Image: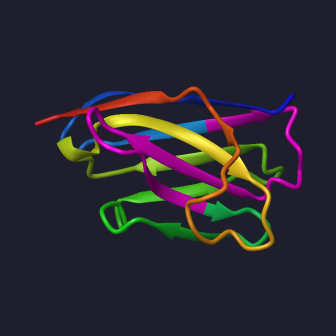
Amino acid sequence: QVQLVESGGGSVQAGGSLRLSCGASGFVYSRNCMAWFRQAPGKEREGVARIWTTTGVTYYTDSVRGRFTISADDDKRTVYLQMNSLKPEDTAMYYCAAKASVFCGGWDGYDTWGQGTQVTVSS
C-alpha cells in the first residue's frame, strides 16, 4: 500500500520559514512526479510546486516562485518543501501528492495523496 505522510507544518510569523517533509512508504518507484498542493479555507486546491524526480526538474506556481524550494532526497522516498519569506496568504493545508507519468507537466493526474499538514502564517 502506497502512503504519503506529511510533516513539518506549524504556525509562524510573516517573514518566517518552515520546511515540510513528505515521506513515502510502500512507494512504487514509477511514481516519478511529486508535488505539493495547498488548500485554504473557502478556496480551491492549488498546485504549489512539483518535481520530476527522474531529472530533478522543478516548477513553481507564480505566487511562491523565489520563496519556496521543492527537493527530493537521493532515494526519492522523501520530498521537501522549503518555504521562506512566508506571507499570511500562504496559510493553508498543504498536501503532498504523487503520480506516474512520462512527463511531469501540469497539475492533473495525481493519484496518491497524503493527509495534509497545516501551515498558518500570522501578520
Tally of marks: 0
Q: Nearer the viewer, residue 22 or 75?
A: 22
Q: Nearer the viewer, residue 107 or 12?
A: 107
Looking at the image, residue 118 lies above or below residue 60: above
Residue 41 versus residue 34 in the image, above or below: above
Quadrant housing residue 61:
bottom left
Colour style of the rendered protein structure: rainbow
Q: Quadrant of the N terminus?
A: top right
For image coordinates 26% across by 35% down, the residue present is 42
Residue at 78% in and 51% down: 76
Q: Is residue 5 above or below residue 83?
A: above
Q: Position of residue 51 (x, y in %)?
A: 63, 62
When the figure is inspected, residue 33 is found, relative to residue 55, above or below; the finding is above
Q: Position of residue 62 (x, y in %)?
A: 34, 69
Apparent side of residue 4 relative to residue 17 in the rendered image (left or right)? right
Q: Quadrant of residue 70?
A: bottom right
96 relative position to 65: left or right: right
Residue that lies at the very extreme toward the left in this rendered image: 123
Quadrant where the C terminus sits is top left
Q: For this view, does 120 lie left or right of residue 111?
A: left
* Segment tinted magenta in the rendering: 22-50
Q: 81 or 40, which is in the foreground?
A: 40
Horizontal arrangement in the rendering, residue 72 relative to residue 36 (left or right): right
Does the segment drawn in magenta span residue 30?
A: yes
Residue 44 placed where, x, y %? 36, 45
Residue 19 place in picture, x, y as percent:
47, 40
Q: Is residue 28 magenta?
A: yes
Residue plotted at (52% across, 29% down): 116
